[in-house]
Image: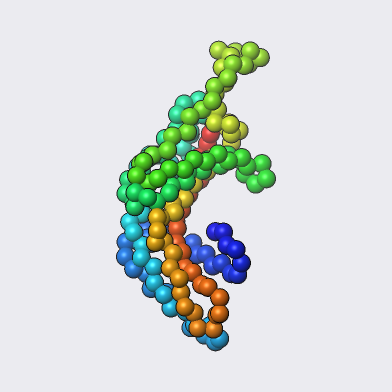
Amino acid sequence: MSQVGGVSYQQRLPNGFIVPGVFQFSASGSPVQIQGSLTVGSPIQIQTAPLAAGTVVASNQNFTVNWTGDDAEAIVTVTLVAGTGLAAVADYAQADASAGSITFQPVCADNPVRAGGNGVICSFGLPSTAPLEIILDVTPASPNTTSLVVQGITGAVQAAWDYRYEFGGLTLQ
């Protein structure tokens, strides 16, 4: 979450928490009191299967993530993260939710030094045989933020929402 200044609060919510509707929130105390609401639309539904732990993603052929639903103007960011910790490398792509999919295409190059093969290597530019995580971040179209008047705070206060799907324990080969 990006911010210019101030404080940011984030919360990991259980699967199935996001449902369409109006969410009310409040916090009371001294000297700050806050009340507000956010309208949440329908989340996207991931159609790509399987993305369960143990799934192998081939780095020598197109890999497509498919979804349905959500506001057509929402932005979906799909990130492939190969490796862990400081050695992790990522590649990402973005599309409007109305596109319904994002495809990662491997880049193939001739490799005359490659032993025992046709001399062609294809990859997404990520280390092969690395642990793979696939992350889908969805940023709903406006209005996904609301301005609030908060007793006890003189500056601007905004509440915003977005959501993420994480699929870990995959392998890139």
Q: Measured along the vertical axis of the image, is residue 116 above or below residue 29?
A: above
Q: How many marks?
A: 0
Residue at the limit of the structure toward the front, as seen here: 155
Query: Which is more toward the observer, 35 or 15?
Result: 35
| Residue 92 visible in this rendered orientation of the protein | yes
Residue found farthest to the bottom: 30
88 horizontally vs 42: left or right: right
Find residue 66 and report its horizontal and vertical position in percent: 37, 40
Q: Horizontal and vertical percent for residue 41? A: 34, 59
Q: Nearer the viewer, residue 126 or 16?
A: 126
* Residue 169 appears in the rendering: no
The residue at the point 34 percent across, 68 percent down is 22
Q: Position of residue 166 (x, y in %)?
A: 48, 49
Image position of 59 with respect to 150: above or below? above
Quadrant the N terminus occupies:
bottom right
How far from the left and from the top, in percent, is residue 171?
52, 36
* Above or below: residue 17 compared with residue 170: below
Q: Residue at x 58, y 41 (%)?
A: 90
Q: Residue at coordinates 34% horizontally, 52% vertically from top-left? A: 71
Which residue corresponds to the image point at 66% horizontal and 41% vertical from the top-left? 87
| Residue situated in front as seen by the camera: 155 or 18 | 155
